[in-house]
Image (cartoon, coloured by chain):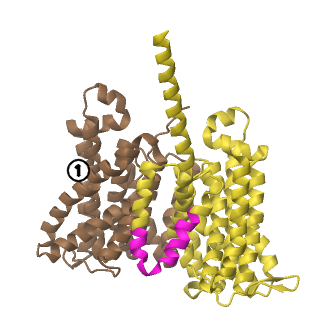
Chain colours: A yellow, B brown
Amino acid sequence: MKKLAFLAGLLGLLACIFVPTLLKNHGIYLFTYWLIYVIATMGLNLTIGYAGQKSLGHAAFFGIGAYTVAVMMQAGYSFWLGMPLAALGCFVVGLALGFPALRVQTIYLAFATLGFNTAVWLVMRNEEWLTGGTFGINNIARPEAFGISFDGNLAYYYLVLTFAVVLGLLLWGLLHSPWGKAFTALRDNPIRAESLGVDIRGYTLLSFAIGAAYAGIAGGLFGSLVQFIDPAPFTVEASIMMYLMVVVGGPGYFLGPLLGAAVGVILPEWLRFAQAWYLFVFGTAVVMLMIWLPDGLLSIPDRIRAKRQSREASAARAAAGQSGVKA
Amino acid sequence: MTDFLQLFFSGLATGSIYALAALGFTLLWQASGTINFAQGEFVMLPAFMMLGFMAAGFPLVLSFAASCVFSVFVLGWLFKRGVVDPLFKFGMMPIVVATIGLSIAMRNAVRAGYSAEPQPFPNLFPDEVYNIAGVTISATDIGTFAFAIALVLITQAFLAKTVTGRAMQAVAQNTESASVLGINVPRMIFYTFAINAVLAAAAAILVTPTYLAKFDMGSSLGNKAFFAAIIGGFNNSRGALLGGVIVGVCENLAAAYISPAYKDAVALIIFMVVILFKPQGLLGKKVERKV
């Protein structure tokens, strides 16, 4: 099974490398867009799926990252200086926000992050001296490194892909360290985890802040992709959409964000002409999904396996019962 | 000082509308553990129902009555049957996610099916302005406040004084003992949903003349209602009133004296302060956590 998953991952990666070479500019753009949301939702998946926290302010961190890189580049600094700053900034803000909000669990964090998102959005819209207000920031350049320019769409796509793969591997490593196991323990039964000596507060706070840092990096990449940012992509609605992407893909499934971001970003972007109807169908589908498949799309194989096992078990029981009667 | 009073009174009017939405929100939470993220859309939909009835030639008051009936059916019965009942056994989060999905679906159904443009909406109250000792107050503000507070008080009196209301409270406090005592639990929970639907329709008729009927009018209203409910105390229905009024008044004052651009952040700031110092809300009681 492990081997199969590894093979599938390798095939997926190869597809991500070669398919875009066959696409036109808009297709490459969509792929890049998708990967950026994959990075952002990977971080959110850590917060929601592994640590079990409900965060509805992810787009705020996404926006903080985007504006940090854009403002730094406007001021003449390099992309490569802005990027770590964006990640670090989001990490610190995440700690500062999570600290009061995590005093009270679950739903309060959702409201606190939601309100935080509104506040950040207001700053983006109102502080024109810094963010350009509703006019936004124009002409954000694409970066270059070691004499290679990532100006072309395909080149930039590969840069984003590199980021996604590296960040994905980091997350994988984190989750499979003893440290990462503590996250899951905490989601599954916080009180038991605490009695076993897991520092709940510290771990939830860290998972939240790391998730925020991933969003910051994704935001920085987003600014350079679109080359123009205004407050519109960083609203509360965008955060809610990111949350739903994680939930639809399957929270706590490592590859969930790949699927979730595809449903949440690629499809609406592609079906732009019918956006309102698409969102109507999407919203209805989320309700249906919760009723029939509350663990997300990637739980389908597990679901089928569990069903088969229970059928086999009951068949075995029936057989055992019959042989018992004969004897 | 007159400025301050004027701002205070118009803040009271807005706050009482928040209180209506917040009250429905806490009632649903108490009775069925439902955190309704579509609460704002539950206000938006009756506004469009009323527009529909008025387009069919009904006067405003009659349209309101008809929308109440429709709301009880769609936002009460259908919502409970279709979304909450099947998800009840899974706990809180699936319902939260489902109501988020529902809010997106409702908003976009109206946007795609009716109109994306804001629609004008007639005012229930006359367009008069009174001047009392130098303080100007509009009839709309007085009427809105009086109507909303009356509804909140009636709801509370119903819960506290009538047999049905007490049975509903019993269900909210302890569902199992309530059913042992012979209370029809599903029916009581349905009543809660019905009351929520009527409160939402009332909020709609009060808020829409100023906000205009638009598909996304519910999102900011819904957020304010959440914050108001938590500030006042999530497990206390009087808290909703207090929280709503605090948010409405502070918002209005902050918009005038600090910065109109940051008006929407006021509720968040109060909320953060409250959960830092009194996480159960101003009027809430502490609940021990269970293993």
Q: Residue B174 occupies which quadrant of the picture?
A: top left
Residue A235 % position (x, y): 53, 72
Q: Nearer the viewer, residue B89 or B269?
A: B89
Q: Nearer the viewer, residue A14 or A265?
A: A14
Is residue A182 shown above or below A164?
Answer: above
Q: Which class describes the residues within 10 Å of circle 1: few (<14), some (14-19), or many (20+)?
A: few
Q: Is residue A63 above or below residue A298?
A: below
Q: Main secondary structure of the magenta part?
A: helix
Q: Residue at x 24, y 62 (%)?
A: B146
Q: Secondary structure at mark 1?
A: helix
Residues shaded magenta: A260-280
Q: Is residue A305 above or below residue B41?
A: above
Q: In the current view of this chain or complex, which residue is farthest to the right?
A: A146
Quadrant of the rendered structure where residue A141 is? bottom right
Q: Is residue B255 visible?
A: yes
User: As drawn, which residue projects farthest toward the bottom?
Assistant: A139
Magenta segment: does it hold B48? no
Q: Which residue shows up at 50% across the image and 15% down it?
A: A323
Query: Which quadrant of the rendered structure holds the N terminus of chain B?
Result: bottom left
- Report in which chain the residue with disc 1 lies: B
Q: Position of residue A324 (x, y in %)?
A: 49, 13
In the rendering, at what x and y percent does residue A40 appear?
Answer: 65, 66
Residue B219 image offset from top left, x and y in percent: 42, 67
Residue at 59%, 76% in the rendered image: A123
Q: Residue furthest front?
A: A326
| Front-most of residues B248 and B22 | B22
Identity, as a three-letter code, of the amino acid under mark 1? Ile
